[in-house]
Structure formats: C-alpha cells, structure tokens
C-alpha cells in the first residue's frame, strides 16, 4: 500500500494537492485524524482497491495526535506501508493575503481567541512533527493551482526510481528565497546583463543573454564550482534516500543570471541523471489563489 499524507499550513494548497491525487486514482480522505492512520492502513491491507491512498492531516487534529505522529509513522513503516509525507508551506504574508481574498476563517481563529496572524504562527508550531517527517517540502508562495497540481503529479505520483529527482530552480532574491530549496546559490556577484539596455527585457533563455554571460569568466567558474560540488555530493544524497533535491539559483530579479545557470546546469546533469527538471520561478509569476 502507498499512503501519501498531505499536510501543511492552512491556505498553502492542501485541498488542491489532495484533489490532484484523487484525480490520479488515489483514494482521497480529507482531514483524517492522525490516530486513524493505522486502522486505515489495516483496512486497506484487506481491500485490493485501496493500494494507493491519500489523506490530508492538518492543525484541526488533536494536538496529542500530532505530537505522536512520528511514532505513528514508525508503526506504519514497520507494517510495510510505503508512507510519504508532503508538507506544503507559504510565506506568512501570502497566507494572510489568501485568507483575505477568500474571506475564509482560519481553523484556529474559530473560538475568537487568536487573530489571523497569531493563528498562522501557532499553526506552524503545531505542525512541526509533520514538517519534520516530510519527504517532500513544497513552497507554494508563487505557485498557481495549476502549477501545484502539476508539481504534485510529477513528484508524488511518478513511478519509483533509484536516483533522486534533481530540480534546478531560478529565483529572484527581491521576491524572497524559496522555502523548499535544499541548496541555495547566490549569483548576484556575477556580471549583470540588466545594465545592458539591449538585454534588459530579455531573459537567460535568450541567445543574446547566453552569449553575454558565456563570454564572462565568472559565470563559467560558478558553473564549474557548482557542478563539481553536486557531482561530488549527489551520491551521498542518494544514499540518504532523498527522493527530490532542489537546487535554487538566485540573482536579483530571477530573470538573467539565475535562469542562465539553471538552464546550463540542468542540461549538464541531464547527461548524468535519469530525472532532471528545470523551473524558473520568477519569469512568469502567478500566485496560488485557491
């Protein structure tokens, strides 16, 4: 049995993620009490049609159940259940904006004792046992619903493979550091095509920008240093049973230098790794709104 547990802060896209898995053939259960995970797995063991189950667990659970979650995970694994926890997160500012846009109440504000900002902060603390057990962490701050569903399909419902998926993600520091990055490289020390007015409106995918950066020694040294580091350490990540490694490459706006290096590193590692992906977070930002 494969059991996918979707968790994360309210407003981060848990419902969209669960619906995506349901559309992919998973038996989906929303807001399951954590204490019922073991009985659910036992029931699934005797029903052939419950080989793939997805459940969402959030701060609406009893706090004692959330605190015992690591023990529950150990029990499920010992019983032969293939468990994957997917934790969704977003910046507090984004969560505030989403609740304001939808006019929904945060589940921790229903007794009137907490403000929305206090509830968002407290929820993060309550979910630490789930966040620390996550095999996949997703930052949905700048994801649309469509992008989130595609990401869930790619990362969660993909076929098992021996090597971890390697994702190269460009971003702009002015829009914040990705919360789900495993490794972050600051490229703001490299020559900036932005100051060439003929390149300002282009991106690191355009040949003119590629030629500009390829002619500079520093971008080539940065590429060599990052690729050598990853080639040296990827075997260790593989041995630690990581299913996904996100390498975030940041420049000021996420348009030129980071895009160029993400593309070049991605193409380089495609020759060595079975599953390499490239994503440019800030080329066409479209925030998650539902």
Image (cartoon, rainbow, N blue to C red):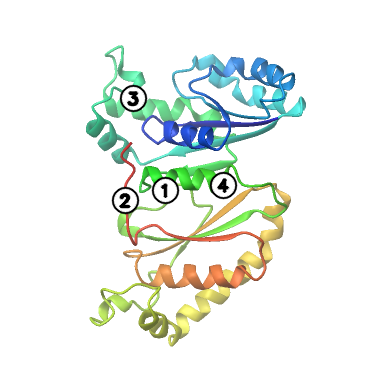
Q: Is the residue 244 above or below the residue 122 in the image?
A: below
Q: Earlier in the sequence, mark 4 or mark 2?
A: 4
Q: Position of residue 43 (x, y in %)?
A: 69, 16
Q: How many marks?
A: 4
Left or right for 168, reference 3: left
Element marked by disc 2: loop
Q: Position of residue 7 (x, y in %)?
A: 50, 31
Viewer-nearest of labels 1 and 3?
A: 1
Q: Position of residue 220 (x, y in %)?
A: 50, 80
Residue at image location 43% in from the left, 31% down from the top: 15
Q: CA distance from mark 4 to mark 3?
A: 30 Å
Q: CA distance from mark 3 to mark 2?
A: 26 Å
The answer to whether the residues at label 1 and label 2 have Cβ atoms under 8 Å apart is: yes
Q: Is the residue 52 above or below the residue 274 in the image?
A: above
Residue at image location 34% in from the left, 72% down from the top: 203
Element marked by disc 1: helix
Left or right for 136, reference 75: left
Q: Earlier in the sequence, mark 3 or mark 2?
A: 3
Q: Is the residue 159 above or below the residue 252 in the image?
A: above
Element marked by disc 3: helix
Element marked by disc 4: helix
Q: Earlier in the sequence, mark 4 or mark 3?
A: 3
Q: Position of residue 290 (x, y in %)?
A: 33, 36
Residue at image location 34% in from the left, 62% down from the top: 283
Number of the label disc, if any, that sits on residue 286: 2
Which residue was labeled with disc 3? Answer: 119
Q: Nearer the viewer, residue 130 or 208?
A: 208
Q: Earlier in the sequence, mark 1 or mark 4?
A: 1
Q: CA distance from mark 1 to mark 3?
A: 27 Å
Which residue was labeled with disc 4? Answer: 155
Q: CA distance from mark 4 to mark 2?
A: 20 Å
């Amino acid at each position: 049995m494969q059991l996918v547990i979707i968790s994360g802060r309210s407003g981060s896209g848990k419902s969209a993620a669960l619906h995506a898995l349901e559309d992919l053939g998973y038996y989906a259960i929303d807001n399951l009490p954590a204490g019922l995970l073991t009985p659910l797995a036992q029931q699934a063991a005797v029903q052939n049609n419950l080989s793939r189950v997805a459940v969402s667990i959030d701060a609406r659970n009893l706090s004692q159940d959330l605190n015992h979650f690591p023990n529950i995970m150990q029990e499920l694994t010992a019983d032969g259940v293939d468990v994957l926890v997917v934790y969704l997160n977003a910046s507090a500012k984004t969560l505030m904006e989403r609740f304001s846009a939808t006019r929904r109440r945060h589940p921790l504000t229903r007794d009137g004792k907490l403000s929305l900002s206090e509830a968002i902060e407290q929820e993060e603390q309550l979910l630490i046992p789930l966040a620390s057990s996550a095999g996949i962490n997703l930052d949905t701050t700048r994801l649309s619903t469509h992008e989130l569903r595609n990401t869930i399909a790619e990362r969660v419902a993909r076929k098992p493979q021996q090597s971890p998926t390697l994702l190269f993600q460009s971003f702009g520091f002015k829009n914040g550091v990705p919360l789900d990055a495993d490794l972050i490289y600051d490229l703001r020390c490299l020559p900036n095509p932005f100051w060439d007015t003929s390149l300002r409106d282009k991106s690191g995918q355009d040949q003119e920008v590629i030629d500009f950066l390829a002619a500079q020694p520093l971008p080539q040294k940065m590429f060599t240093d990052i690729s050598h580091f990853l080639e040296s350490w990827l075997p260790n990540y593989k041995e630690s049973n990581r299913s996904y490694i996100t390498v975030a490459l940041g420049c000021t706006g996420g348009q030129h230098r980071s895009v160029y290096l993400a593309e070049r590193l991605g193409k380089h590692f495609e020759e060595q790794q079975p599953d390499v992906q490239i994503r440019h977070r800030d080329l066409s930002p479209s925030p998650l709104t539902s």
